């Protein structure tokens, strides 16, 4: 599929005209600002943008102490508010902080009201039932209707129809917090709502925690008391209620009277996904990030106390709650390595935003505009553009990866992506429209309006002129910038990309007619995608009985089994994606090649209706087929084969309407599975490791809660067996001065254990501890060596198969592969495979590359580009460690 088509479909989604250039080697032209950047300019800008990010990350300001005080103070206020009114208690504080904003003294947290949240962790019985209502005329907003006997508890906060009023809930919580600030509230809460650093988590980790049983939740705390929580009256705290939530201004006397801002966003957790969103079902199943997107859509949403902008037409405005998906956003942002091109592009865009918003460009003097009078003038500042707007533009760019995503996001394309994003932002500002990434017919420009008031037209004009001036300055200065020598890691990554393309091209393809030429690896990879698609469907439909909202086809008039319904759902999803991606191309050709538009438009409508009719006939055949009904469709490998059989049957069955639309889609699907299918083993291994770690942690928790084993003996036992969560706990103890508090939270009570170790009195314990750790390392080394052997066996078989099918071209690929094999040192930042493997979490890519030998410097490249994404930081938080420790509520703090 051509890049032109990808950009044309993007133009339709964005509501404006983006740049039409692709990030290929050579010059690019920005279609909105009409600027052309040569290859030399792009290389110079690559150096400049990397330095811009490095300088921001190397900022010497340390805000960890301030963050700790702010978190403990907010936790104290939360607990006091819960004591005053138990309906507003919250066990977790969701952190929405960003490193750059923390350094600026700006914090943001989400207060999750447990009593109203679906899948709430509140132990109270008789919790109110919340029903979600969506309004098709206002995407991105929902209403919450109270049902059941428990709704009487909230009757003072609902309207006559039983819908929860956003303004009353926010006003009540603001009053509770104001009371907690003025006077000390007695500690009347139960032990389960304790205050621990592990209860301050990001949205992704909280989603994982809430999906685990109560007895699997462990929190770390300091065994040595840090003293009481800070009293609000000991600080200058001012509370301001605005349209975006509650704003706290806190004066910290210990830090030279520094004042920080804390924004509290009040939210209600909903475990399902909004039905009006076209994400992720618009993502084609052959997309390189398909697994990422359909996994992110299983993380639920939040209804936050933010209403529509003032000019929106809606009824009963006070009952509308904005939809936020912080967990999905976190999953997508953390998917890429910190120094990969996708992550660097986002970092550069945010740094540019901060500079232009503050009215300064310290690193790059702005080019003076012609005709401006002499004399000082106030610097222009961005007014409309926000972090959310920039991230929306960036996510659209990641979605339209083009036909070769690996090459499109190579290390030397950083400046290209930054310039294209800024150019598309200028186009969006001129149109005053930017489509929301998750919801159709939702303008982000209006959603991000500060104070709920739409921006004046002058603000849009000022912003796009400022960005145009900035791009002109980049174009002017990039000629004279000093170009650094390319980093060795970037050179190696580019070389690995070339070699990887050769290997993929040389891989033998199935020639038999069985399974339509799909290899076993392709089928396994496709079955994993289908599994995540069905899980996303189930997450979407938890609270909604209409299971046909995912597609545009009518509801069937006869009953089917659940397995056949899943098969029909997958078939309709693929056909809908193929249709939506084929007709824009056909419409463009009609506009270009024919002047009789009305005649062609009627013909297109007839073709569309005929396509829908053909799909209905195909579904009818499937529903009535007894052989399909008798298949074991609960097995995803069987489901995958049956789905492919019906898709290819549909092409043969209707060559006039189905085949022209479906064949390009299936060709893209085959090629994508051929390229990405080799990762099946590592992905499955990561899932198995995560499941086994969680199972062992669950057994440990049950044993401790039932007093069958002490925590210390249990940790030593599981450490000797090589479990990573136990090893993480031991490291936490050693880092925290040999003292750790473990907090278990079963449903009816809280259990606390203090693990202490006195070296002078417990030498035997130290010996046992060291012996267990030695056994753990031996187990880990054996596992690693076995995986390495397995990998090289696979490479040997791969080389043999290539040698039997290829001649000279294959020989060149083999030589390239051999020279780029296990000898290449991969440093912190090699990201050559972040696009080809971007549909897999980076934690799952560590199966074959973690070495314990210090002579190998902990990390070694094997020759596959995808493995180059790993870094020491990611090795320390591999999937199983991450699942166990983060489910316990901590990421990198604690003791052991």
Image: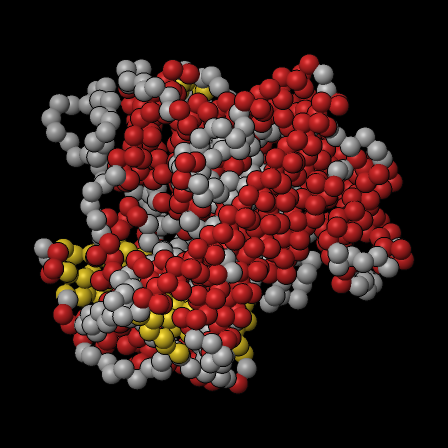
Relative image position of residue 757 (x, y in whole percent): 30, 68
Q: Is residue 120 above or below residue 871?
A: below
Relative to residue 184, is residue 708 drawn left or right?
A: right
- For residue 225, say whether it is visible: yes
Q: Is residue 448 above or below residue 429?
A: below
Q: Residue at x 28, y 49 (%)?
A: 101
Q: In this view of the protein, which residue sits in the foreground, 470 or 69?
A: 69
Q: Residue at x 53, y 33 (%)?
A: 862
Relative to residue 558, is residue 195 drawn left or right?
A: left
Relative image position of residue 344 (x, y in whole percent): 39, 36
Q: Quadrant of residue 354?
A: top left
Q: Quadrant of residue 107?
A: bottom left
Quadrant showing the C terminus? bottom left
Q: In this view of the protein, which residue sits in the foreground, 332 or 166?
A: 332
Q: Residue at x 51, y 44 (%)?
A: 846
Q: Is residue 415 above or below residue 301?
A: above
């Amino acid at each position: 599929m051509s890049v032109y088509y990808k950009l044309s479909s993007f133009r339709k989604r964005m509501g404006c005209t983006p740049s039409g250039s692709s990030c290929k080697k050579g010059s690019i032209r920005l279609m909105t600002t009409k600027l052309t950047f040569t290859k030399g300019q792009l290389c110079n800008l690559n150096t400049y943008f990397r330095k811009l990010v490095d300088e921001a990350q190397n900022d010497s300001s340390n805000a960890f102490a301030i963050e700790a005080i702010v978190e403990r103070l907010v936790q104290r206020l939360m607990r006091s508010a819960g004591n005053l009114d138990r309906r507003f208690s919250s066990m977790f504080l969701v952190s929405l902080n960003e490193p750059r904003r923390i350094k600026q003294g700006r914090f943001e947290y989400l207060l999750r009201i447990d009593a109203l949240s679906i899948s709430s962790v509140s132990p109270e019985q008789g919790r109110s039932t919340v029903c979600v209502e969506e309004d098709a005329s206002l995407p991105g907003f929902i209403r919450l209707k109270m049902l059941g006997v428990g709704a009487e508890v909230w009757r003072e906060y609902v309207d006559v129809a039983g819908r929860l009023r956003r303004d009353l809930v926010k006003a009540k919580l603001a009053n509770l917090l104001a009371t907690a600030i003025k006077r000390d509230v007695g500690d009347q809460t139960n032990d389960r709502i304790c205050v621990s650093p592990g209860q301050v988590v990001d949205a992704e980790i909280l989603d994982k925690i809430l999906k685990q049983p109560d007895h699997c939740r462990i929190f770390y705390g300091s065994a040595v008391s840090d003293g009481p929580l800070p009293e609000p009256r000991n600080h200058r705290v001012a509370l301001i209620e605005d349209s975006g939530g509650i704003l706290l201004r806190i004066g910290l006397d210990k830090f030279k009277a520094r004042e920080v801002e804390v924004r509290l966003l009040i939210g209600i957790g909903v475990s399902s996904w909004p039905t009006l969103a076209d994400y992720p079902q618009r993502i084609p199943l052959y997309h390189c990030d398909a697994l990422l997107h359909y996994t992110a859509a299983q993380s639920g949403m939040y209804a936050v106390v933010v209403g529509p902008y003032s000019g929106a037409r809606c009824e009963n405005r006070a009952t509308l709650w904005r939809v936020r998906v912080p967990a999905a956003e976190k999953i997508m942002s953390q998917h890429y390595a910190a120094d990969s091109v996708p992550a660097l592009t986002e970092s550069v865009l945010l740094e540019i935003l901060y500079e232009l918003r503050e009215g300064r460009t310290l690193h790059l003097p702005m080019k003076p505009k012609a005709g401006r009078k002499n004399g000082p003038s106030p610097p222009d500042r961005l007014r409309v553009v926000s972090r959310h707007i920039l991230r929306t533009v960036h996510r659209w760019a990641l979605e339209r990866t083009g036909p070769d995503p690996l090459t499109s996001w190579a290390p030397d394309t950083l400046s290209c992506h930054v310039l294209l994003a800024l150019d598309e932002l200028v186009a969006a500002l001129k149109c005053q429209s930017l489509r929301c990434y998750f919801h159709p017919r939702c303008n982000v420009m209006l959603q991000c309006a500060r104070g709920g008031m739409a921006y004046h037209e002058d603000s849009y004009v000022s912003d796009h002129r400022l960005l145009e001036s900035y791009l002109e300055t980049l174009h002017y200065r990039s000629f004279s910038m000093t170009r650094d020598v390319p980093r060795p890691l970037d050179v190696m990554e580019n070389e690995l990309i070339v070699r990887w393309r050769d290997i993929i091209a040389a891989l033998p393809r199935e020639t038999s007619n069985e399974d339509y030429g799909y290899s076993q690896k392709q089928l396994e990879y496709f079955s994993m995608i289908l599994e995540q698609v069905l899980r996303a469907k189930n997450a979407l439909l938890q609270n909604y009985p209409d299971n046909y909202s995912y597609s545009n086809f009518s509801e069937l008039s006869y009953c089917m089994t659940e397995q056949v319904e899943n098969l029909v759902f997958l078939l309709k999803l693929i056909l809908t994606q193929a249709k939506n991606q084929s007709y824009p191309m056909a419409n463009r050709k009609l506009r270009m090649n024919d002047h009789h538009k009305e005649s062609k438009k009627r013909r297109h409508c007839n073709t569309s209706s005929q396509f829908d009719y053909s799909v209905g006939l195909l579904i009818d055949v499937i529903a009535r087929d007894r052989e399909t009904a008798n298949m074991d469709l609960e097995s995803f490998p069987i489901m995958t084969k049956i789905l492919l059989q019906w898709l290819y049957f549909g092409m043969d069955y209707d060559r006039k309407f189905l085949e022209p639309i479906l064949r390009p889609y299936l060709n893209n699907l085959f090629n994508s599975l051929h390229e990405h299918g080799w990762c099946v083993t590592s992905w499955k291994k990561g899932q198995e490791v995560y499941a086994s770690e969680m199972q062992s942690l669950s057994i440990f928790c049950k044993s401790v809660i039932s007093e069958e084993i002490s925590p210390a003996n249990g940790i030593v036992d599981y450490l000797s067996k090589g479990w990573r969560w136990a090893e993480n706990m031991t490291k936490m103890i050693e880092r925290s001065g040999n003292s750790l508090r473990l907090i278990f939270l079963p449903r009816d009570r809280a259990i606390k254990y203090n693990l202490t170790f006195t070296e002078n009195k417990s030498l035997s314990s130290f010996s046992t501890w060291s012996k267990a750790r030695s056994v753990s390392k031996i187990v880990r080394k054996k596992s690693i060596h076995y995986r390495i052997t397995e990998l090289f066996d696979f490479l040997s078989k791969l080389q043999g198969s290539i040698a039997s099918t290829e001649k000279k071209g294959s020989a060149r690929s083999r030589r390239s592969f051999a020279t780029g094999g296990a000898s290449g040192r991969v440093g912190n930042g090699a990201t050559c495979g972040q696009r080809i493997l971007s549909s897999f979490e980076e934690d799952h890519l560590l199966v074959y590359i973690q070495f314990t030998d210090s002579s190998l410097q902990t990390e070694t490249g094997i020759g596959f580009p995808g493995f180059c994404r790993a870094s020491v930081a990611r090795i320390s938080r591999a999937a199983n460690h991450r699942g166990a420790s983060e489910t316990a509520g901590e990421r990198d703090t604690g003791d052991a």
